[in-house]
């Protein structure tokens, strides 16, 4: 084994997610020799803010890197590259030395919404957008500034207008993968893929390396505060000597340009060919599939973006509600730290949820769960929607509620399926199931039964982003061919739809959608203030 490690080459892949970093050593066959993760805090502020501590980001990353190298036994000389993927629409301003000037602004942060709405207002107005402005943004970028303020442009505008001293001192605004790469190399750079949510680049062409004048003018962010753009498949250089020493890596280790996690998760699930979707059951939940064209469905809040693969577009349908909803339900309602004293949150919280849900028949005996704790995004943006349980009775138990949560989240995935197939232009034959949620057999079977498609579950779903980013790095170094990647990805089970359960869920889904439409005015009345 040690001899194999000496002769093999590895990529150190870093996946910076909402819940914290995941780090893994990936070999040329797409196998993970060792991996580690660590939690980070997300601070919710009373004014709609949501922030991370960048110092905690770096400290947890370094801890995970050291642990992975130590436990793998892989010699530093065998680690030829570092590759970073991350969540996106997350902004951090830094000074000329690369030092953070404030906390990281999360994709959940809504404080920049008024400034986005100011950009797109006007007559004639369509769903809050001046028609001509919306159409031009869709044509150039692929989507307009969000009215919810959840994109990177809104976050930068929040800094500009409400933290003017920080804006004045800002040398560059960074998305997470580019900030981490800067810490590794000292290089202030990004790509067309990573700056997508800043809405400053013309995406009608691929591999663009300049910002668009009209978009810069509309956005109102000074060009010099944006990182220079490198090719999507570019290489930044080697890590700095100080970082090499800190992390225990060779100073010859190369750092490749990062990509957003939609792109890396699609690659990590083997979704390289056109129209082979990966359903990523992570914190937010999204569907990703490579396509050869640029297209947008503004009514369904979905479209395509420049992929992390050179010369390709990636379809994305982002629900913004998935694993985080399950976590909130379990932590706030089942294991809340209050006077009911339900005890310490167990380490196997999610496994227990699956076991309890399995005790209840499909359909949760009529209980419906609306999963929109964070509003709705794809396939229909509505920032005022919220979650809730419907049709409770005296016999409703925590088991019913728990299964209903899994089913309600799956209903949202089913809602996403139709508009996604329409945009891509062909029906799906199956989904590749990946992300932490796919570890649950119960949830995976519910997904198959509710969505009505076979679910091919990745054997190592937690490491999808790590695997995808590692293989992308090997490809950029000329050591792995893209067409060989699908055969490297292992799947441990296919969950086939059960016709009896599908019939139950067809009836439930009709009421789920009816509930969504009928209760919308109530949510708007409660939440618009």
Image (tube, rainbow, N blue to C red):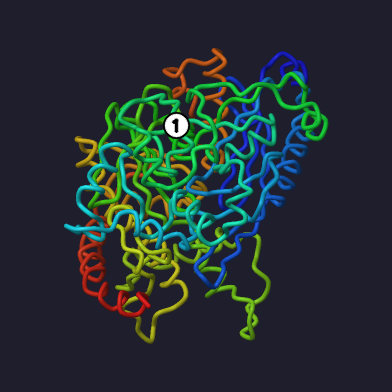
Task: Indicate whether 230 appears above or below 426.
Answer: above
> At which x and y percent is residue 55?
72, 50
Mark 1, Cα crowd under 10 Å, few <14 / some 14-19 / many 20+, is many
Would residue 351 be found to the left or right of residue 67 on screen? left
The N terminus - image quarter? top right
Task: Indicate whether 474 appears above or below 439.
Answer: above
The mark total stands at: 1
Q: Nearer the viewer, residue 104 or 261?
A: 104
Q: Nearer the viewer, residue 274 or 124?
A: 124
> At which x and y percent is residue 159?
54, 56
Would residue 78 be found to the left or right of residue 311 on screen? right
The C terminus - image quarter? bottom left
Q: Nearer the viewer, residue 233 or 386?
A: 233
Q: Residue at x 32, y 70 (%)?
A: 368
Would residue 201 be found to the left or right of residue 126 on screen? right
Q: Residue at x 62, y 28 (%)?
A: 26
> At which x and y percent is residue 511?
22, 68
Quadrant in the rendering for residue 149: bottom left
Quadrant in the rendering for residue 115: bottom left
Q: Nearer the viewer, residue 37 or 364?
A: 37
Q: Residue at x 55, y 59 (%)?
A: 350
Residue placed under numbered mark 1 in the picture: 192
Residue that extends furthest to the left in the rendered view of this protein: 124
SS for callout 1: loop
Task: Indicate whether 106 appears above or below 463.
Answer: below
> At which x and y percent is residue 223?
49, 38
């Amino acid at each position: 084994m040690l001899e194999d490690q000496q002769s093999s080459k590895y990529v150190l892949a870093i996946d910076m997610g909402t819940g914290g970093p995941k780090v893994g050593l990936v070999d040329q066959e797409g196998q993970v020799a060792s991996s580690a993760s660590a939690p980070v805090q997300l601070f919710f502020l009373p004014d709609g803010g949501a922030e991370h501590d960048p110092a905690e980001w770096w400290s947890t990353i370094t801890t995970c890197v050291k642990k992975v190298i130590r436990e793998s036994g892989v010699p530093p000389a065998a680690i030829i590259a570092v590759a970073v993927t991350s969540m996106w629409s997350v902004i951090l301003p830094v000074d000329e030395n690369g030092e953070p000037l404030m906390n990281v602004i999360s994709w959940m942060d809504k404080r920049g919404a008024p400034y986005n709405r100011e950009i797109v207002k006007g007559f004639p107005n369509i769903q809050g957008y001046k028609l001509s402005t919306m159409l031009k943004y869709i044509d150039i970028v692929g989507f307009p500034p969000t009215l919810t303020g959840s994109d990177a442009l809104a976050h930068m505008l929040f800094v500009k207008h409400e933290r003017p001293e920080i804006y004045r001192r800002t040398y560059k605004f960074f998305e997470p993968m580019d900030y981490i790469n800067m810490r590794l190399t000292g290089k202030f750079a990004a790509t067309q893929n990573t700056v997508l949510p800043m809405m400053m680049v013309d995406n009608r062409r691929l591999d663009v390396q300049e910002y668009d004048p009209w978009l810069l003018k509309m956005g109102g962010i000074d060009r010099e505060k944006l990182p220079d753009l490198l090719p999507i498949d570019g290489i930044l250089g080697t890590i700095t000597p100080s970082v090499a020493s800190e992390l225990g890596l060779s100073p010859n280790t190369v750092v490749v340009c990062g990509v957003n996690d939609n792109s890396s998760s699609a690659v990590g699930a083997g979704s390289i060919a056109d129209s082979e979707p990966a359903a990523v059951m992570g914190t937010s939940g999204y569907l990703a599939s490579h396509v050869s064209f640029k297209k947008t469905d503004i009514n369904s809040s979905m479209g395509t973006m420049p992929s992390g693969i050179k010369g390709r577009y990636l379809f994305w349908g982002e629900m913004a509600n998935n694993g985080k909803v399950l976590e909130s339900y379990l932590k706030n309602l089942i294991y809340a730290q209050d006077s009911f004293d339900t005890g310490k949150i167990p380490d196997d919280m999610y496994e227990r949820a699956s076991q309890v849900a399995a005790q209840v028949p499909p359909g949760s005996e009529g209980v419906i769960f609306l999963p929109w704790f964070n509003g709705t995004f794809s396939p229909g943006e509505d920032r005022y929607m919220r979650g809730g349980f419907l049709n409770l009775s005296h016999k409703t138990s925590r088991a019913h509620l728990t299964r209903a949560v899994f089913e309600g989240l799956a209903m949202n995935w089913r809602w996403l399926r139709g508009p996604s197939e329409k945009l891509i232009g062909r029906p799906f034959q199956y989904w590749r199931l990946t992300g932490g949620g796919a570890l649950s057999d119960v949830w995976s079977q519910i997904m198959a039964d509710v969505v009505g498609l076979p679910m091919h579950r990745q054997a190592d779903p937690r490491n999808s982003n790590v695997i995808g980013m590692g293989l992308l790095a090997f490809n950029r170094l000329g050591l792995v061919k893209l067409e060989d990647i699908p055969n490297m990805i292992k799947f441990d089970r296919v969950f086939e739809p059960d016709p009896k359960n599908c019939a139950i869920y067809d009836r439930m889904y009709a009421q789920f959608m009816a509930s969504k439409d009928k209760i919308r005015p109530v949510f708007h009345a409660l939440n618009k203030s």
